Image: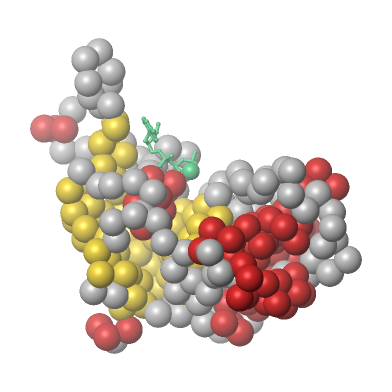
Amino acid sequence: MKNDVILTVKNIYRTYGGNDEEKEVEALRNVNLEVRKGEFISIIGASGCGKTTLLRLIAGLDKPASGTVSLGDTPITGPDPKRGYVFQQGGLFSWLTVEQNIAAGLKARGVYGKEKDKIPHFIELTGLQGFEKAYPHQISGGMAQRVAIARSLINDPEILLLDEPMGALDSFTRADLQDKLLEIQRNSGITMILVTHDVDEAVYLSDRIVIMTPRPGKIAEILDVNLSKKRNRASENFIEYRNRILDRFHLASLEPEPEYYI
Ligand SMILES: Nc1ncnc2c1ncn2[C@@H]1O[C@H](COP(=O)(O)OP(=O)(O)OP(=O)(O)O)[C@@H](O)[C@H]1O
Ligand SMILES: [Mg+2]
């Protein structure tokens, strides 16, 4: 099991502010997580509990106050296309077409000339055929998120980090994109870490669910989801998991803080 670990987050602390008059926010306190190759992990928690902060640290977009994040044996010191990142707000280039947005992933790595023939495959994989020449304002929110996912996947990442990619979508589009994501993950074996507010989404997609609590942001619990890969949202088992997570989440939020932190 140990050898399967692809990502190690160890004793991470991250604090914002605290200078002059500014109030200090302990965004992450002593966060520890080991992610195995090919796993689908969801991180859930209330707004402000540090989910984006944690994902940005894994992406190398930010540095911890202390602790380490490593991919394999290599400490993460900055961004790298090996860790694809899909932003909370899509982040497409509005002046580029779908195709050009996906190509931007290759250009960022300086391999556009060599690898541009891969673009049609990723258009197809994310179900964007027929929209190659469309601009972001001409496609739906769900499609825009699929473009962002394709733009990361074309760089053949070892890990895909997704920050609430479905947050702004209606429930039908959301269910569609969830299935697409699962299909891609099953076929590619890419390790995925998804941040979400949505307990159902987490149970539907994940091998494990990381429950976080705010102020300070920390991991309250990590739950295994022992359900078959093909999940039915209406099944008794599924509902039982959802309720269990809601219960634990509620309990974790009620936990009193030790006095010396007040
Ligand atoms: N750049 C920053 N400067 C100061 N404080 C910040 C900064 N980024 C985040 N914070 C604070 O750190 C805490 C964690 O923020 P973070 O964005 O990681 O939460 P989140 O769990 O992603 O929330 P949401 O679900 O709303 O996206 C919050 O209290 C937030 O106000
Ligand atoms: Mg966030």
Q: Quadrant of the C terminus?
A: top left
Judge whether 190 appears above or below 138 on screen: below
- Return the residue nearer the eye: 236 or 64: 64
Q: Nearer the viewer, residue 61 or 25?
A: 61
How far across and how far down the image is residue 212, in percent? 37, 51
Asked whether, in this view, residue 97 is left or right of residue 57, the answer is right
Across and down, in percent, residue 127 comes to: 78, 70
The residue nearer to you, when weighing 148 against 244, is 148
Is residue 256 among what the camera can see? no
| 62 relative position to 91: left or right | left
- Residue 150, compared with residue 11, is above or below; it is below
Q: Would you identify the image quadrant in which residue 58 lies?
A: bottom left
Using the rendered view, name the quadrant where residue 215 is placed: top left
Image quarter where the N terminus lies is: bottom left
Q: Residue furthest right?
A: 130
Image location of residue 120, percent across then percent down: 75, 74
Q: 241 and 214: which one is in front?
A: 214
Q: Residue at x 44, y 68 (%)?
A: 82
Taking the image in four quarters, ligand 1 sits in the one at top left
